[in-house]
Amino acid sequence: MEPPAAPGPERLFDSHRLPTDGFLLLALLLYAPVGLCLLVLRVFIGVHVFLVSCALPDSVVRRFIVRVMCSVLGLLVRQSDPRLRGAGTRVFIANHVTPFDHNVVSLLTSCNTPALSGAPGFICWSRGFMELGVTGSRAELVDSLKEYSAHQGNPPLLLFPEEAATNGRAGLLRFSSWPFSILDEVQPVALQVRRPLVAVSVADSSWITELLWTFFVPFTVYQVRWMPSVPRQADERSEDFALRVQELLAMELGVVSTRITAADRTEHMKRLRHTARLPFAPGGEPLLLGGSLSALSDRLPTLNPSPCARCPFSAALSQRPAARPRVPPSLPGGAPEDVRVVAMAQQVKEVLPHVPLEVIKTDLVQTNCVDTTIANLLEGRVPFFPESKEAEDLPAPSTSQAAAASGIQGSVAAPSSKPATKQFAKSPVERHLSLQERKRALYDYARRRFAEKHGAARAGGSP
């Protein structure tokens, strides 16, 4: 049995908080008046919880009182196997789900979490982070934490190697190796969070927003599972140690251990924000800066009537026997999905022959649309190195869109298009129009290559 495929970034992070199910959305609307009342009431109670936690010293009594008061705020904390908790371990390793994971664990045992980001000060201290005063590299941070752990009187460390929060349902981010360079023994802690009506956490949401939603919903259940301590094996590198603990924690949570990093999450969120800023057509089709992709593709030569308005390239080529891409001999028994990707890649290759085939396949796996892949390649969203002399006519979009557009306008000039201005436009409107002209030149170039390629094939096939 083959292992399950690793989930993509879109499955690890929630970009929408509200439910998509109609029944749940109706229930949320009916609950909204009650939730708003709870929100106002819990804000005042939360101030008292904060004052109590600041006034009392760290002890079992303080943790019990604060835990009971947090249950009034809707934070219900449960734990399993408490006898395994802190059995001589100085470093706890946990998965990251919400901005308050360290606060929840601190309700069960004494621990400190160093502040890795954000400005030090009152906000950092009030959120329960430990300020080390280290703003340099990770090596300086590790040295500071080693010195901290050397003092037996200090509480254990609670670290989150993922360095970014996920939804906790699909998989774990790749663990960083620096938390496993502090000591040779760590104790994994599995965190699971459940909440009715809305998502537990949303990517790129501030901790204030998450706190208000926590006060709004009826309750949020944190399940903390303590796992046995894991020692470092002989001559085991920190990277291998981190990977082994990640696999153990993923098995305990019932999720997949991925190789997606926090940097990949940042890039994924940038793409989501870029897509969200694009306007939408009245019919619901997303628009690009130079107009809708479907509107641009309508200006391409139509070889045969296409039943798919969103993918005229693939539909037109698939209806012509002469234009059907040939599947390589190495895939005679391959999956239908692989054959379809290869077929679409050949279609894109005929339009953009200077783009490497592997780059086209990689983007097609993500987009699943010929038009979208062509647009990504023309607009420079997918970097690549040209593999033929045709790159001289069409510079690679990986350098810059302006260089690519100027190169194309020099070799392929549309009669109705205006020459690109050589000076930087002062007005935003003029700069936007200049970008539209460059994008239109890119599409005209692809359209002409498409027409020349298949116009010649049609002429050669006619009697």
Image (cartoon, rainbow, N blue to C red):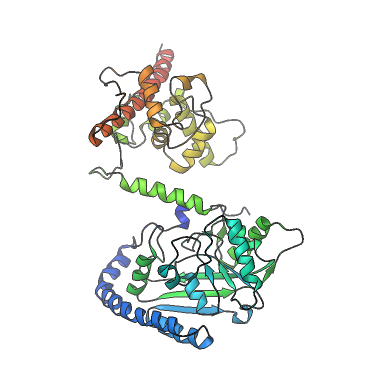
For the N terminus, the image quarter is bottom right
Q: Is residue 245 above or below residue 331?
A: below
Q: Quadrant of residue 299?
A: top left
| Vertical position of residue 413 compared to residue 261: above or below | above
Lateral position of residue 67 relative to residue 21, left or right: right
Q: Position of residue 166 (x, y in %)?
A: 47, 61
**The furthest residue to the top:** 463
Q: Residue at x 36, y 20 (%)?
A: 448
Residue nearer the viewer, 255 or 377: 377
Who's the residue at 47% across and 78% down the image?
Answer: 77
The spot of residue 463 in percent (x, y) is: 41, 11
Could you say which is closer to the camera, residue 438 or residue 11?
438
Instruction: From this view, report whether residue 223 is shown above or below residue 302.
Output: below
Residue at 39% across, 31% down: 401
Return the x and y of residue 121 as percentages of the image width and height: 43, 67
Q: Which residue occupies the extreme front position in the image? A: 133
State the residue in front, 437 or 150.
150
The answer to whether residue 305 shows anywhere in this view is no
